[in-house]
Amino acid sequence: QVQLVESGGGLVQAGGSLRLSCAASRSDSSINLMGWYRQAPGKERELVASITGGGRTNYADSVKGRFTISRDSAKKTVYLQMNSLKPEDTAIYYCNIVAYYGTVRTTSWGQGTQVTVSS
């Protein structure tokens, strides 16, 4: 199974920017979807953004126009550029990948990185 390591979280003031990175342990052509989720205290984990193998992106309404997801061509690293951050963006951010090996669907999660936005 592919291992994921996130980096780039931290503390930032409202209106600031952060860039999260998620590196996979190996390039894998079976990776179909790469994405970022977040979980705030007392709330359920929610999808922030995702990108398919073909480069199609999807964003939560709350981050549209502020966040941008991208990945390298080898599908080994996925990024989340976060601009105009708001206090409500404070959460632990998790990287996620979905891969298909034949008909078998597998999913992997990173360990999470804390993002804190102060007002």
Image (tube, grey):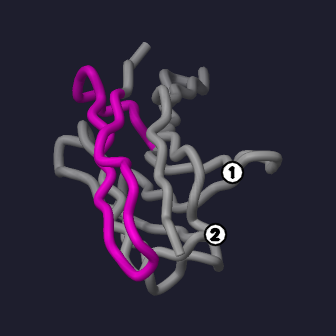
Q: Residue at x 40, y 82 (%)?
A: 15
Say which amino acid is labelled 2.
Glu
* Image position, residue 23 (x, y; %): 27, 34
In the shown orientation, is residue 85 left or right of residue 55? right
In the image shown, does 9 or 51 lie closer to the viewer? 9
Which residue is most to the front?
119
On the image, numbered disc 1 is attached to which residue? 40
The reply to whether the magenta stretch includes residue 9 is yes
Using a 10 Å C-alpha cutoff, classify the residue at mark 2 as few (fewer than 14 neighbours), some (14 to 19) or many (20 or more).
Answer: few
Q: Residue at x 35, y 36 (%)?
A: 6
Cβ atoms at labels 2 and 1 below 8 Å apart: yes
Instruction: Give the quadrant of residue 103.
Output: top right
Q: Residue at x 43, y 58 (%)?
A: 51
In the shown orientation, is residue 97 left or right of residue 61? left
The reply to whether the magenta stretch includes residue 104 is no
Q: Earlier in the sequence, mark 2 or mark 1?
A: 1
Q: Is residue 106 above or below residue 36?
A: above
On the image, numbered disc 2 is attached to which residue? 88
In the image shown, does 79 or 58 lie closer to the viewer? 79
Say which amino acid is labelled 1.
Ala
Q: Secondary structure at mark 2?
A: helix
Q: Residue at x 46, y 29 (%)?
A: 110
Which segment did they paint magenta?
Answer: 5-32
Q: Secondary structure at mark 1?
A: loop
